[in-house]
Image (cartoon, grey):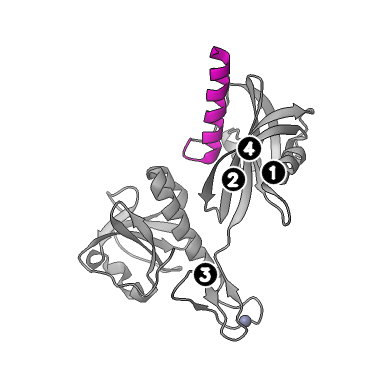
Amino acid sequence: MVEQNIRIQADQLAIWLIIIGDKVVQLIHQPGYLKSAWQDLSFVHAYQEQIVKIGDYEDHACFLIDMGNEQIDSDAIELISLRSILMQVEKPFFGIAARAWQVALFMRTHRFCGQCGTTMQQIDWEMAMHCSRCNHRCYPRISPCIIVAIRHKNKLLLAQGKPHQSRQMYSTLAGFVESGETLEEAVHREVMEEVGVKVTNLRYFDSQPWPFPHSLMVGFLADFAGGDIVVDGHEIIDAQWFDIDALPLTPPTLSIAGQLIQRTIEEIKQDQSS
Ligand SMILES: [Zn+2]
């Protein structure tokens, strides 16, 4: 997956995911990902030893450089959020940007062994940090998280989470899988905890890495099986059954939440026309 000890060809175009603090470097006048030859990125040349290869995209190698909290004084670049980058790129690049971000976060948070406190070293044949004193080894953290669209006849159950309150946005339900739990058990538990209803007929839909900070969203479609909506009041502040002709503001289809909503609308329309 990730190669280290790489050689950079100075004049060859590559894609660079350069992270400073919690922002990504973007060239002014070049929205989306940063495509450039190494020789033209003088502000980052001091970090050559820290380049990590993340993958390939459209015949270009993609490299990560984490500059920590370095301050850069340059008119040629600006710092933008990962979310803004993801809004500007196509879906295949989404995974590469997500991986770069998660690898950077992993390296930052695994400098010392969690077992004995010794400084960890990066392994050069796989993405892992290793403790040479006690042999403890760590891999980038991935947190599985279920996300589910619930349908009842011509309606969709959508909820407003606290982070979406200011924009009045409603979305599908989602929650982290707990230790020892199957994905399906997580769906049933989360839906019951957050809105107090039962679901049935779970169908796997798709998955999406979601690097905020290290989730893997596992999407399901489900049918309502009973119960009245009772929101938990902590994570969810409102939930309602929405007719597909009167939907509130929902997430864009770039996110799996938006895709789940879109698919449910299509299925309802298909049933209405048949
Ligand atoms: Zn150790």
31 or 17, which lies in front? 17
Secondary structure state at the residue bearing disc 4: strand
Please report whichever mark, 2 or 1, sits nearer to the chain's N-terminal start.
1
Q: Position of residue 229 (x, y in %)?
A: 76, 30
Mark-to-mark CA distance, 2 and 1? 10 Å
Q: Which mark is residue 108?
A: 3
Question: Magenta stretch?
Answer: 253-274
Identified at 58% across, 53% down, the residue is: 215
Furthest-top residue in this view: 273
Read off the residue under disc 1: 184
User: Looking at the image, is 49 positioned above or below residue 20?
Assistant: below
Mark 2 / mark 4, whichever is N-terminal: 4
* Amino acid beneath label 1: Glu
Name the front one of labels 2 and 1.
Answer: 1
Q: What main secondary structure does the magenta stretch of the protein show?
A: helix
Query: Mark 1: few, some, or many residues within 10 Å (few <14, many ≥20)?
Result: some
Q: Nearer the viewer, mark 3 or mark 4?
A: 4
Position of 146 relative to 198 (above/below): below
The picture places residue 35, in percent across and down from the top left corner, at 28, 56
Mark 3 and mark 4: Cα distance apart in space: 32 Å
The residue at which mark 4 appears reads as: 148
